Image (spheres, rainbow, N blue to C red):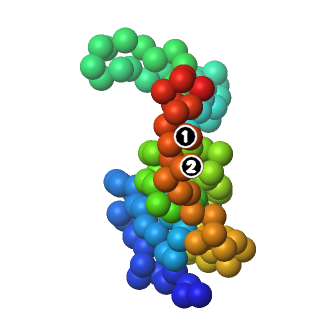
Amino acid sequence: MKEIQSNDIMHIGFLKMEPFAGSSEGMRFRMSKVTYTEPDTELLQKIEAGEAAYPIDKKTGETIMNPTKDRYTLGVWVWPEPYSFDFTPDEYKTFREFVFSEDGVMEGLAWLNEEKQAKDWAEAALSWTDWKTMAGKADAGV
């Protein structure tokens, strides 16, 4: 089994803008920035202490009473071939999060290789029969 190498994936500069998907010997994978929007508690504390003012929405000019900030992680998914991320049901995917940094990308790469070694991905591959079953559930609204 061939390991996935660092030159087989995209690095943080690319992942800041686009998700990256690939495959290796029956295992498909995706790396993507995951965004969580959370209350900006630090700003709210400064506002309460009188050290800052509520921010103003640049488009509307309205005061933002519940300011938020985005937090990013690196999401890494693996699933059996042959279908794309969007056409594979979530129950076939395994997901893990890492710090959104170049070190996180390298940790994600190490995890991909662990997952690759942990399963016979060619055996796990979804067949046309699986696809017809999944499509039938989607058509039935399941």
Q: Sort mark 2 into few (<14), some (14-19) or many (20+) by Cα contacts within 10 Å.
A: few
For residue 62, side relative to residue 47 (left or right): left
Q: Residue at x 49, y 75 (%)?
A: 24
Q: Residue at x 63, y 31 (%)?
A: 41
Q: Please provide percent x and percent y for residue 94.
A: 65, 55
Q: Sort mark 1 into few (<14), some (14-19) or many (20+) by Cα contacts within 10 Å.
A: some
Return the mark for residue 79.
Answer: none
State if disc 2 and disc 1 touch (CB < 8 Å). Answer: yes
Q: In the figure, 8 relative to 126: above or below?
A: below
Q: In the figure, 24 relative to 101: above or below?
A: below
Q: Which residue is mark 2?
A: 130
Q: Please provide percent x and percent y for residue 71.
A: 55, 44
Q: Which residue is mark 1?
A: 134
| Farthest front residue in view | 129
Question: Can residue 132 be seen here?
Answer: yes
Q: Please provide percent x and percent y for residue 42.
A: 62, 35
| Farthest right residue in view | 118
Q: In the figure, 29 relative to 133: above or below?
A: below
Which amino acid does the dot numbered 2 rest on? Asp
Q: Residue at x 30, y 23 (%)?
A: 58
Q: Please provide percent x and percent y for residue 35.
A: 51, 42
Quadrant hosting residue 106: bottom right
Q: Nearer the viewer, residue 29 or 91?
A: 91
Q: In the figure, 68 relative to 94: above or below?
A: above
Which amino acid does the dot numbered 1 rest on? Met
Q: Which secondary structure, mark 1?
A: helix
Question: Can residue 76 be seen here?
Answer: no
Q: Nearer the viewer, residue 113 or 18?
A: 113
Mark 1 and mark 2: span between their CA atoms?
Answer: 6 Å
- Could you tell me how many numbered marks the image carries? 2
Q: Which secondary structure, mark 2?
A: helix
